[in-house]
Image (tube, rainbow, N blue to C red):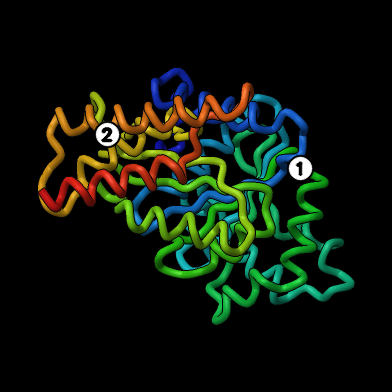
């Protein structure tokens, strides 16, 4: 088991606690029990979506849930590497090689056990010539519905959404989507574009996870550095966007007083939003991004 799976090898660390918080946030979103499938995507490669997917899945399994990770990145999937599994029979093999009549009956051949109790993995499989077409097939839709019935939660590790459309396509078939953003990696324009694309195809967005935030780090034996991951949902959206904006202004770095101005503007929008209904939900990340983009544009013109 690789040391990247910190929630399994070091469950008492700070980062493991952050993932348990992320799991709790998702569970609060699922009070009606309808959330059975979750897609994890990112804007570009290197933001840590596979790492987030794996560690999040482990925390659900540790809570007694029957969990399946489906590596839906059939181009450069990593889940077989993280869990040290064979990748000879995975998602692509299932979608290509099984017939309509035998597909669901033979699904067990494409799912592997892990060292984590209650956690199973369907690896990406061989690299197909047409991954986007496979994800839009009726067989894929049927597979998702079937997996939702036999597992408590199915986590799909998707592709980076500004590179290929695979994850965008998949987002309309799952219950909700989380976008992983990398500290000082993700661009606001890219994040906005991914969100628009998911919404345009009919997908839902649960929030944003900010990964690779600088913390006090300790080097492990194999040289891997563990980064902090934070979930951005509802009120925490402004904190996440604040971190991102330290990198995204093309004209100059935002100074401390300007960060305060951003927070002031976001807080005013949130208060205005709360007055519309007695039980109005906290400010949506779409509103946050819109307000922030307007502020950055005005700031860069100065």
Residue at mark 2:
262
Tell me which corner region of the image, top left, top right, bottom left or bottom right, holds residue 94. Answer: bottom right
Which residue is nearer to you in this view: 268 or 84? 268
- What is the number of the mark on residue 300? none
In percent of width and height, residue 12 lies at: 45, 18
Cβ–Cβ under 8 Å for marks 1 and 2: no
Q: Is residue 14 left or right of residue 109?
A: left
Residue toward you, 212 or 79 = 212
The quadrant where residue 228 appears: top left
Label 1's element? Answer: loop
Q: Residues within 10 Å of mark 1 (few under 14, many from 20)?
A: some
Note whether 89 is above or below 78 in the view shown: below
- Can you identify the residue that label 1 sits on? 151
Real-space Cα distance between discs 1 and 2? 42 Å
Closer to the camera in the image, 242 or 293:
293
Q: Taking 28 as reference, is 222 above or below it?
A: below
Q: Residue at 45% across / 35% down in the picture?
A: 232
């Amino acid at each position: 088991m690789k040391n990247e799976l910190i929630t399994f090898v070091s469950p008492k660390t700070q980062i493991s606690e952050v993932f348990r918080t992320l799991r709790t946030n998702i569970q609060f979103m699922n009070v009606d029990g309808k959330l059975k499938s979750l897609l994890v995507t990112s804007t570009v490669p290197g933001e840590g979506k596979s790492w987030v997917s794996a560690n999040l899945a482990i925390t659900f399994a540790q809570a007694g849930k029957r969990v399946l990770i489906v590596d839906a990145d059939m181009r450069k999937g990593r889940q077989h590497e993280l869990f040290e599994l064979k990748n000879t029979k995975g998602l692509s093999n299932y979608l290509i090689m099984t017939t309509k009549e035998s597909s669901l009956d033979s699904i067990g051949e494409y799912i592997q056990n892990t060292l984590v109790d209650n956690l199973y993995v369907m690896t990406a499989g061989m690299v197909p010539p047409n991954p986007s077409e496979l994800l839009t097939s009726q067989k894929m839709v049927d597979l998702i519905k079937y997996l939702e019935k036999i597992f408590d939660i199915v986590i799909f590790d998707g592709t980076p959404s500004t590179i290929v459309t695979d994850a965008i396509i998949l987002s309309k078939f799952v219950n909700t989507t989380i976008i992983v953003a990398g500290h000082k990696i993700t661009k606001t324009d890219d994040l906005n574009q991914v969100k628009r694309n998911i919404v345009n195809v009919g997908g839902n967005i649960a929030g944003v996870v900010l990964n690779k935030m600088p913390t006090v780090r300790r080097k492990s034996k194999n040289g891997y550095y563990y980064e902090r991951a934070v979930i951005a949902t509802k009120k925490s959206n402004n904190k996440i966007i604040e971190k991102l904006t330290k990198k995204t202004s093309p004209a100059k770095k935002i100074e401390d007083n300007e960060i305060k101005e951003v927070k002031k503007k976001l807080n005013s929008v949130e208060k205005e939003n709360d007055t519309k209904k007695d039980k109005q939900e906290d400010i949506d990340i779409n509103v946050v991004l819109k307000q922030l983009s307007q502020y950055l544009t005005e700031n860069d013109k100065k």
